[in-house]
Amino acid sequence: MKNVLIVVDMQNDFIDGALGTTEAVSIVDRVAEKIRSFDGEVIFTRDTHPEAYLDTQEGKNLPVVHCVAGSEGWQIHEGLTEIRPCCVIDKPTFGSAELGAVLAQRNEEEAIGEITLIGLCTDICVISNALLIKAFLPEVPVRVDAACCAGVTPQSHRNALEAMKMCQIRIDNE
């Protein structure tokens, strides 16, 4: 059995760009170390929006242009994808159906022992993808390393961790 690490949206706009926070900046080194020391496959997700982001449903509810495909803010933080071989899945919204399908296919090829999520933002994309993964692979244990995540606010980060616990997602390093 193999383990899989999902690195959610560790992009410049979420770290120190348009939607950056001090909490996001503070996890970068821990995320790099987690990637470096992880024993298994690493998959990154990348929030990806069109130039006309403000015309989308998300853009109307979160009117801050961010992660526009090809922009500096869209890029995964420097050096993270170079730590080890990985794949990157672009996603147009919070949760990635493509990620769920890729993981289901990988599980068919070789059983996945466990899936761990880290990254940004705990309260939007991390929780969305964790729940989506549980839907695609209900018998595969899913965990979140809280020390390698940050939310929009510290309170919303804690709320998301509590919500994931209720959905049988294990939370480590709170």
Image: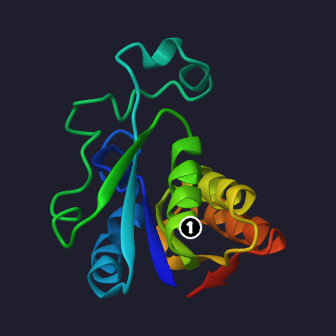
Q: Label 1's element? A: helix
* For residue 11, above or below residue 142: above
* Display colour scheme: rainbow
Q: Quadrant of residue 60?
A: top right
The structure residue drawn at horizontal position 27% and vertical position 39%, both measured from the top left corner, is: 73
Whether 174 is drawn above or below 18: the answer is: below
Q: Position of residue 69 (x, y in %)?
A: 30, 29
Residue 14 in percent (x, y) is at 38, 49
**Residue extending farthest front:** 109
Q: In the figure, is residue 57 to the left or right of 6?
A: right
In this rendered view, identify the residue nearer to me: 42 or 174.
Answer: 42
Residue 166 occupies which quadrant of the picture? bottom right
Q: Is 113 left, or right, of 25 in this rendering?
A: right
Numbered-mark total? 1
Left or right of 113 in this view: 28: left
Q: Is residue 135 above or below residue 23?
A: above
**Residue 6, image x and y in percent?**
46, 65
| Residue at mark 1 | 107
Q: Residue at x 67, y 53 (%)?
A: 132
| Residue type for callout 1 | Asn
Looking at the picture, tell me which residue is in the foreground, 61 or 165: 165
The spot of residue 172 in percent (x, y) is 59, 86
Q: Residue at x 38, y 33 (%)?
A: 66
